[in-house]
Amino acid sequence: MDAEDIKSWSEEIVRAISHAHMAHAVHPVAPDDTVRFHDRSTPYLVHPIWCAATLLQEPNLPLELRKRGFVALLWHDTLEDTTLPLPSSTSDMVAQLVHHMTFENFEEERTKLWECSTEVRLLKLYDKVSNLLDANWMKAAKWNIYVDHTLKLATDVEQNFGVLNIVKIARSIAEHKYYVLAQTCSDKKCLIAPMPRQSVKEN
């Protein structure tokens, strides 16, 4: 890839991020869809950018997969959480990835995701891990269900793509899989607190 190719690709990256920004910041389905749930302040855009950038930096995946996966991850929540359609110039492959990553709810995803391609499941692992990074708002039961799903995805991705960095990150977070609820004295919100390390179980 020569200097002109890199410049062109960089411009494509900027345009893809710009579309994601417009979708989540300007065309949300509801006002709450513009921010992350954990603090109601962090722009939602942070989530797809993290997913996409982490994929793009993975050295053990083919470049073409990373390039189309980067765009698909940037836009993976736009059909669900925004009213902005995909750009008319979107390639069929990227559009298909985005559509196949879109589910009515988490329960449908847990059931139907396994009917999707290995590439869609790979991209979904980036989505799930990113969500776990700021999931301190989840109660223990939901956290454990979410982690079970993420670990299942990590195993699937490892079988199909090898031990990628995202697999290592997923398992690092899941080390503290079993959590208990802690009650704060100040605001009475339920928070997630890790149990002692020796009590962690493996599935």
Image (tube, helix red, strand yellow):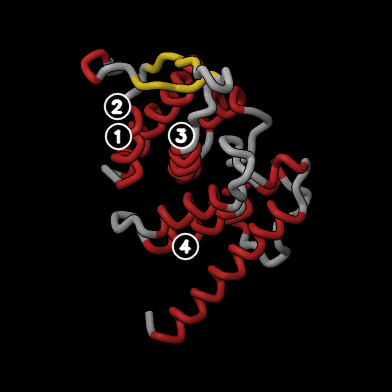
What residue did someone put label 4 on?
67
Mark in the foreground, 4 or 2: 2
- Which numbered disc, 3 or 4, marks the residue that appears first in the sequence? 4
Mark in the foreground, 1 or 4: 1
- Farthest front residue? 186
Circle 1 SS class:
helix
Up/down of 4 relative to 184, above or below: below
Q: How far apart are labels 1 and 4 at the CA level? A: 26 Å
- Farthest left residue? 198
Instruction: Count residues near mark 4 (Cα–Cα under 10 Å), then give few for <14, some for 14-19, many for 20+.
Output: some
Q: How far apart are labels 1 and 2 at the CA level? A: 5 Å
Residue 167 visible to the viewer: yes
Q: Quadrant of the N terminus?
A: bottom left
Q: Nearer the viewer, residue 95 or 76?
A: 76
Residue 177 as seen in the image, left or right of residue 144: left
Instruction: Count residues near mark 1 (Cα–Cα under 10 Å), then give few for <14, some for 14-19, many for 20+.
Output: few
Rendered image: mark on residue 66: none
- Which numbered disc, 3 or 2, marks the residue that appears first in the sequence? 3
Q: How far apart are labels 3 and 2 at the CA level? A: 12 Å
Circle 3 SS class:
helix
What residue did someone put label 1 on?
172
- Which numbered disc, 1 or 3, marks the residue that appears first in the sequence? 3
Looking at the rendered structure, the kind of residue marked 2 is Glu
What residue did someone put label 2 on?
175
